[in-house]
Amino acid sequence: MIKTYNGSKLGVTSSHKKAMLRNLASGLFLHEKAETTLARAKELVRYSEKLLTRAKKSDLSAIRAVSSEVHKREIVKKVFDVLVPRYKAKKGGYTRIIKVGVRRGDNASVAIVRLVV
């Protein structure tokens, strides 16, 4: 039986992928941009937009949900104090992928993920 799974494996184990997306999302929320490969950028957009949508409720369960994914308090504080009010009126599309080119060492497609202002 053929099963379709959501998302790309990115060539790593599931625990590594989860940790990698958490770290990329933390950097994205802190610096409001992240530079990575195109495949990782596409997964990061899916992951970070779900977190921001969940955070827009701004209740205790939303704070706990975001805190369980992003482990640094200053980043969680920035999400709820800066990013949630910024995107309160938007229904989605908080991030943008900008293709930069290829990486010199291994010719991988590189992209920048930015938060839309």
Image (tube, rainbow, N blue to C red):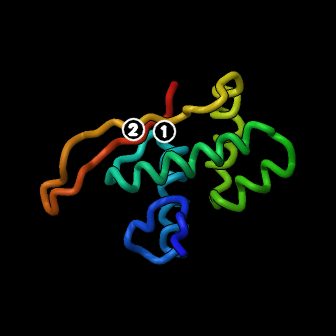
Horizontal and vertical percent position of residue 108: 22, 56
Residue plotted at (57% across, 47% down):
48
User: Depth check: 45 or 1 in front?
Assistant: 1
Say what secondary structure mark 2 lies in: strand
User: Depth check: 63 or 16 in front?
Assistant: 16
The N terminus sits in image quarter: bottom right
Q: Earlier in the sequence, mark 1 or mark 2?
A: 1
Viewed as shown, does residue 58 lie left or right of 68?
Answer: right
Viewed as shown, does residue 111 lie left or right of 74?
Answer: left
Quarter residue 77 falls in: top right
Q: Which mark is residue 20?
A: none
Q: Are marks 1 and 2 in contact (CB under 8 Å)?
A: no
Residue plotted at (55% across, 33% down):
94
Horizontal and vertical percent position of residue 111: 31, 44
Horizontal and vertical percent position of residue 52: 65, 42
Q: Distance of mark 1 from mark 2, alpha carbons?
A: 12 Å
Residue plotted at (64% across, 47% down):
50
Say what secondary structure mark 1 lies in: loop
Viewed as shown, does residue 84 lie left or right of 18?
Answer: right
Q: Which mark is residue 32?
A: 1
Residue type, numbered disc 1: Glu
In the image, residue 51 sits, relative to residue 12, either above or below, namely above
Residue type, numbered disc 2: Ile
Residue under label 2: 97
User: Depth check: 84 or 30 in front?
Assistant: 84
For mark 2, does the 10 Å Cα neighbourhood hold few (<14), some (14 to 19), or many (20 or more) residues?
Answer: some
